[in-house]
Image (cartoon, grey):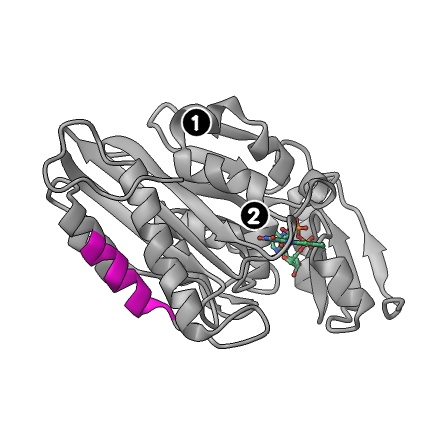
């Protein structure tokens, strides 16, 4: 199918882009177009105008700031993150997720920030950024604001972004300790959306977990933060018992539905198994307790 008729603008400055959004009734930002264009072709979305942000200068970065925070610009593509040495060295959860998002064609155009703005319950980046305690920086006519991921997504395909705001970057805060963790995803075929995805981000000082984040993809009406599971890990060393307890709490936080991809109980079991696998893989040397299940 073809999209409905729309006006197309490709401004060269952020102010101009925000002005165009502010002036229209139903105007959408176009970043990688990998979610918006299919939605328009199916006529699930029929905006009157697209504001293509691909000509805006200086938004294609991902970099670590002197304070240790990671900043990902609105035009940083999935493929940039997949190939990033920076992530491989310092962001295990993001490095694990990047090659699992969609397929190479989509990864060449799609953006992490666009994925957060799209707020698909099956989007991989929202779970990763939620587990990492990330936030989105939005800019509108009234200035800039930082929105924690935990408050950014309000439901399936819904965020707190105003119609005239552009998400200019996503930010991962500096680590309080040594990072470990990962992202595991069950997909029916390579390139599919997640049947179940689990993001785990751990920061350890010595053997003590000083910060933990766990978030779930595809097992609820929106991205789910398994906050009780994460809290259960914090302030103590990782042990087999602790890992098993966190896996149970994460499975309890999931709200899966039975569908053509599997039963609700099957998906809940996958959450349990994925949490255990990631945490067992990230168990720091010297941690006490029974040996835990190893990541495959
Ligand atoms: C075949 C296929 C398979 C896919 N598989 C997966 C998958 O396995 N996992 C996964 O996570 N995703 C998957 N996707 C989605 C893909 O990751 C998209 O790239 C992503 O969801 C949206 O990023 P985008 O840059 O393409 O955004 P766009 O499509 O350009 O925009 C998406 C939405 O976000 C808004 N938006 C985008 N950027 C901004 C911004 N900076 N400020 C304000 N609003 C903005 C747009 O207005 C629109 O509403 C798949 C897509 C396809 C086509």
The residue located at (22%, 61%) in the rendering is 228
Q: Is residue 65 visible?
A: yes
Q: CA distance from mark 1 to mark 2?
A: 16 Å
User: Eyeballing the image, is 238 above or below 148?
Assistant: above
User: Eyeballing the image, is 262 above or below 173?
Assistant: below
Task: Name the spot of residue 222 as percent of width and height, x first.
Answer: 47, 67
Q: Is the distance from the Cβ of mark 1 to the nearest ligand 1 atom less than 8 Å?
A: no
Horizontal relation, residue 106 to residue 7: left or right: left
Task: Name the spot of residue 153 as percent of width and height, x first.
Answer: 46, 63
Task: Please state, as top left, top right, bottom left or bottom right, where the N terminus lies in the image.
Answer: bottom right
Point out the tag, 1 or 2, that comes first from the N-terminus. Answer: 1
Task: Please state, as top left, top right, bottom left or bottom right, where the C terminus lies in the image.
Answer: top left
Residue 82 among those drawn in magenta: no
The residue located at (36%, 40%) in the rendering is 295
Task: Name the spot of residue 233 as percent of width and height, x first.
Answer: 18, 49
User: Eyeballing the image, is 74 above or below 83?
Assistant: below
Horizontal relation, residue 151 to residue 176: left or right: right
| Residues shaded magenta | 244-254
The chief SS type of the magenta part is helix
Q: Secondary structure at mark 1?
A: strand
Task: Name the spot of residue 50 as percent of width and height, x first.
Answer: 77, 58
- Alpha-carbon neighbours of circle 1 within 10 Å: few (<14), some, or many (≥20)? some
The disc placed on residue 113 is 2
Q: Is the distance from the Cβ of mark 2 to the nearest ligand 1 atom less than 8 Å?
A: yes
Residue 246 among those drawn in magenta: yes
Image quarter for ligand 1: bottom right
The residue located at (72%, 59%) in the rendering is 36
Q: Is residue 144 visible?
A: no
Nearest to the observer: residue 291 or residue 175 = 291
The residue located at (37%, 68%) in the rendering is 254
Kindly identify which residue carries mark 1.
64
């Amino acid at each position: 199918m073809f999209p409905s008729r729309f006006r197309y603008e490709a401004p060269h400055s952020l102010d101009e882009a925000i002005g165009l959004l502010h002036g229209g009734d139903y105007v959408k930002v176009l970043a990688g177009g990998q979610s918006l264009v299919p939605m328009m072709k199916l006529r699930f979305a029929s905006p009157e105008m697209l504001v293509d942000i691909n000509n805006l200068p200086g938004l294609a970065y991902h970099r670590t700031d002197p304070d240790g925070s990671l900043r990902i610009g609105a035009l940083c593509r999935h493929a940039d993150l997949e190939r990033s040495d920076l992530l491989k060295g310092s962001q295990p959860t993001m490095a694990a997720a990047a090659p699992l998002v969609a397929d190479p064609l989509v990864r060449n155009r799609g953006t992490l920030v666009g994925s957060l703005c799209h707020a698909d319950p099956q989007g991989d980046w929202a779970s990763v950024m939620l587990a990492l305690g990330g936030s989105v920086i939005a800019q509108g006519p009234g200035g800039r604001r930082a929105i924690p991921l935990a408050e950014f997504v309000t439901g399936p395909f819904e965020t707190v972004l105003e119609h005239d705001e552009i998400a200019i970057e996503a930010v991962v805060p500096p680590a309080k300790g040594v990072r470990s963790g990962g992202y595991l995803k069950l997909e029916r075929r390579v390139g599919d959306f997640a049947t179940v995805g689990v993001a785990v981000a751990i920061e350890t000082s010595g053997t003590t977990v000083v910060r933990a984040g766990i978030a779930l993809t595809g097992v609820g009406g929106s991205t789910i933060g398994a906050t009780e599971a994460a809290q259960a890990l914090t302030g103590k060393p990782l042990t087999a018992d602790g890992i098993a307890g966190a896996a149970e709490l994460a499975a309890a936080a999931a709200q899966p539905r039975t569908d053509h991809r599997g039963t609700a109980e099957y998906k809940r079991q996958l959450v349990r198994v994925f949490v255990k696998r990631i945490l067992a893989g990230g168990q720091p040397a010297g941690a006490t307790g029974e040996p835990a299940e190893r990541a495959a």
